[in-house]
Image (cartoon, grey):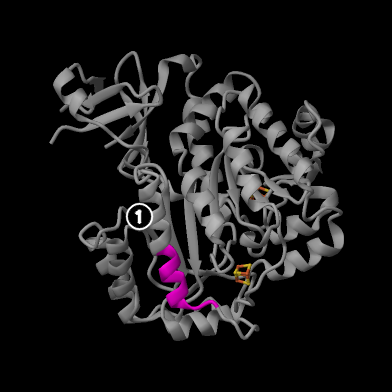
Amino acid sequence: MIKVAINNENKMFTINSNNKVEPLNNSIIEKNIKLSLMDKCLKPKSMIMVNKNTGDIIFETSELYPQHFYPQTILDYANAIKVGMKGNLDNLPILSISTKDYPYCDFRCRECLADPTRMWAIKNINKCVLELEEYKKILKEIARYSRVRGCNSVRLEICGEGNPDMHPDRLEIIKYAKEECNMSVVYISTGSKMSDELLDTLARYAYYVRISLPGISEDAYEYYSNQASKEKFTYNDAMKLLDRLCKRRKKYKREDELMIGVRTCIRSKNEGHYVELSKTLGQMGVDSFQMVKVLTDHIEDKRDIELSEKTQQDLVEISARYEELGLKHIQTPKLLDKLYINRDFLINKKPTKCFSSIVSPILYGNSLIVCIHWDKIRDKEGSYYGILTGKENELEEIMQGERAKFIRSQYPTKCSDCCSLNDNLMLEVIRSNLALFNDMDIIDFMLVY
Ligand code: SF4
Ligand code: SF4
């Protein structure tokens, strides 16, 4: 079967029997390959770095994490590093920003990772919930900063530190980010407080909506979400919400670009429901299903709990059959061993540079912060680039100034663990391969389908 590779300018290539890349030069095949945005992002099997002069593949990676970057791809990151290496790697655009703009939640999930930090944030960050006009100016400034550095559409990940549905200006923020800043909105929530207007706004403007399910049966949902109010949001409510979202997306004819996903943690009370839920989601039109291990904040005694045999079997079955079940993409843990993971650095894996704090920092209220690691959130002196007000050109000073330089000199050397380890390792591999070439213009990156 012919292997097709596509670069960032949508030019098509093929990989010949000598494992060299050459132009496709077949207009019939080119015309027949029509990839929607979702196919383009979800279907690649690998990314290759190619010497354009010789067609040689210099390195190849299958670690693509499409749902992590959607609607961007790893290609956007590779090309940004390539451009950055011609000048200053600290001057990369912000490709993606995660905004933690609402530190209140209606759920009290067991093992909620946001719990300790949002309590801290409410006390210690002067503006956790921004006024709409200030928020708009900040988004505009981020979009401007990245645009002049080559990124025309910043990925804006809205996930609160609580329930983002509850933000009073949510509809305006989403609409403004898309229409005035050309941002690609990614929205992550349980959906428990999603009004019909919010659902409609997401169906029209967002690129990825991911609904988090604390549990994947009625009992498990009730138990893990641990809601205090009498009016509880149930598993069935979440399923109905997903169904409405899929239908609304269809109404706006956005099935090819708005990805709808679900994420759940692998927990004991979810056992026996993974396959059944995958099937239901596939039938509904949901595209992506992530089943992830629970992250621990140094909960030593929990790390050794083994995944049950039944759960391991179900996850293996889903990995093999997800397309047949109607899903476009799934994520299951690489190692089906322990129930819990933590984010400790593996000593021999520590990258030389923290790229993610440059290309994907966190907007925490009005503060720009290197990452969402617990220690960093609390360390206002050592991890906060600065406060954003939305004034034009202020990001140059914040991201390129002395303070930022000092902060960058500390990381990742002084980090004992990392919340963006995979991103940093992947970007490091790209950087180190590019460093082998004096003339980086002879290098191209391509996704292989
Ligand atoms: S919905 Fe999220 S933020 Fe809210 S309690 Fe659950 S895990 Fe924490
Ligand atoms: S933990 Fe350290 S290395 Fe990892 S993203 Fe945060 S600042 Fe960077």
Q: Quadrant of residue 394?
A: top right
Front position in the image: 383 or 255: 255
State which image quarter holds ligand 1.
bottom right
Element type at mark 1 = loop
- Taking the image as drawn, is residue 426 in sight? yes
Query: Residue 181: percent from the left, percent from the top?
Result: 62, 33
- Taking the image as drawn, is residue 96 in sight? no
Q: What residue lies at 43% left-to-right and 62% top-to-bottom?
A: 262
Q: What residue lies at 30% left-to-right and 69% top-to-bottom?
A: 280
95 lies above or below 52: below
User: Is 71 left or right of 168, judged from the image as shown?
Assistant: left
Give the extent of the magenta segment: 233-242
Q: Is residue 241 magenta?
A: yes
Report which residue position mark 1 lands on: 287
Query: Residue 340: percent from the left, percent from the top?
Result: 51, 73
Q: Quadrant of the N terminus?
A: top left
Which amino acid is tagged 1? Asp
Q: What residue lies at 42% left-to-right and 20% top-to-bottom?
A: 443
Query: Residue 37: percent from the left, percent from the top?
Result: 37, 37
User: Is 154 left or right of 203, judged from the image as shown?
Assistant: right
